[in-house]
Amino acid sequence: MRQTLLSIGLAAVCSAQLSAQSEFTLKTQTLTDPENQPLAVHPVPSERQLLWNETEFYAFFHYGMNTFTNKEWGYGDEAETIYAPTQQPNPKQWLESVKAAGMKGGIAVVKHHDGFCLWPTETTTHSIKNLSGNASYNIAEGFANAARELGMKYGFYVSPWDRNSAHYGKDNYVTDVFLEQCAELSKYGDDQFEMWFDGANGDDGYYGGAREVRRVDASYYYDIPNLRDRVHRICKNCVMWGVGGEARWIGNEQGYAGETNWGTFDPAVESNAIRQTGVEGGWQWQPGESDAKATDAGWFWHSGESFKSAETLFKMYLETVGRNATLILNCPPDKTGSLPAATVNGLKELGNLINTRLGSDLAKTAKIEVSETRTSGATRTYAAANMTDGNKETYWATNDGTNQATITLTWDQAQTVRYVQMMENIRLGQRIQDFKIEYTTDGNTWKELAKNIQTTTVGYKRIIPLNGNTSSSYGSGYQAKGLRITIEKSISCPTLSNLSVF
Ligand code: FUL
């Protein structure tokens, strides 16, 4: 409606001016969208943020100097020769193993705070460059090649804080070391999906022998505009995480996001609690990523550590991917340069669990009725069927001004239902603010499910365990002849690109 009024207004102004000036035939242009798509609710994701969101579940591989010193944070004074893999590192094995868990990619730590670089960089001698045998293997190159071979997404963790560099804390560290390192890493593939930087405000370290405390203010020290420019010039779809400002830390490292979780954010009001929920009406699109460990010790491999149970990790999955965040799950390679057998087996078990529980979609066999369907455009429809066609480009929507709606799924025979999954078409912004889910056993009486869960936001993806419990979400389920989703509040007319029932 706003577009139509605007176009009529513009046409009227133009025509008045032109008829006063000349008698040429006037061809009016209208701003009306022939496809009748809803207007976006801003801010909306950039193309690279959208592609990043689709990665959903991916791995972190913390591996490097600390693997050989049993530390989590090296001081920066470690001799290069301490890094001594007992076999040739095998990033293909890392990625194959996480693929079995349903992950779509991974981020390899190629430089942690100790400053040791796992690729032959020109920026420092503190790298694999002058090592030999297994230690000279270029992890950045091997990881990128393996990911491409396996059809997976990949990226690198490069620590801005560098406890080895004599230059850290000075301007030339950023220009001559850090930005150069990021640019060098970009060259391992223009198809990288994310580069990972931590908070990085500095602290004590070796710093070329100075052995002192050096602190910086990460909000300006790392020259973010140039960092983004250097990387995006080569890798246009590489999201700059953390200090890079294109995806936010979720505020904890335990593997959960807020039940209410907005992709919108406002750095001016940030706190760990606010990071978990995002900011409704925030001026930036900065979706949440949850970083968590699949093992029970540190980020790096430590002797005697164990892999968490498939149930624990499935709960984490529901509380992150199922709450409009992405999950980057850490699986540390050991001194052989491969993932230990317990990790490989645990990942397989997790993959099986996810497949069994979220693998066969009952919405595809349901009859779906909606309270309203938006008027079609020239080539586009907004029909209910768009939610179950497996096409992320199509979506259901209501007309402008209709911010409440019901979607009813019915089956001839009762089905055992445990989870409802919804995805908004976030290209048009995150809109839904409140919804509820009910079920019926007889087709007449409806009972609300998951009442204890905040069924508020949806965003890129929301998975609701219908028993209201992420810890023991599977249970015996509900025998449903029908499920009804009522969208009770939405910033503007709601859109859904996917609706699944498991
Ligand atoms: C943090 C680091 O300090 C930890 O060592 C780890 O790498 C974690 C993922 O990010 O900022």
Image (cartoon, rainbow, N blue to C red):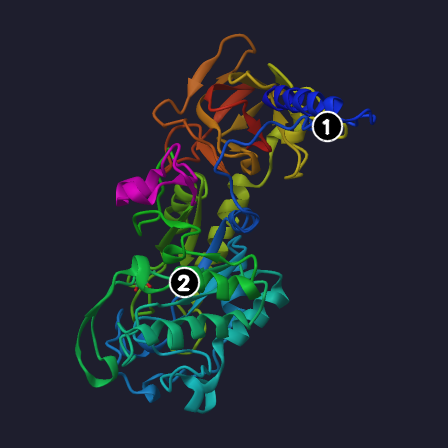
Q: Identify which amino acid the numbered label 1 is placed on.
A: Pro
Residue at the spot of label 2: 331
Residue at the spot of label 1: 34
Magenta range is 261-286
Q: Secondary structure at mark 2?
A: loop
In the figure, 280 relative to 410: above or below? below
In the picture, residue 379 is in which quadrant?
top right
Q: Residue furthest front?
A: 21
x and y percentages locating residue 478 in the rendered image: 48, 24
In the figure, 79 relative to 395: above or below? below
x and y percentages locating residue 38 in the rendered image: 60, 27
Q: Secondary structure at mark 1?
A: loop
Question: Disc 1 and disc 2: Cα gap in Å?
Answer: 49 Å
For ligand 1, the image quadrant comes to bottom left
Q: Identify which amino acid the numbered label 2 is placed on.
A: Cys
**Residue in the picture at 47% in, 78% down:** 89
**Residue in the picture at 44% in, 14% down:** 447
Q: Nearer the viewer, residue 82 or 277?
A: 277
In screen coordinates, is 239 left or right of 159? right
In front: label 1 or label 2: 1
x and y percentages locating residue 355 in the rendered image: 54, 45
Q: Nearer the viewer, residue 475 or 236?
A: 236
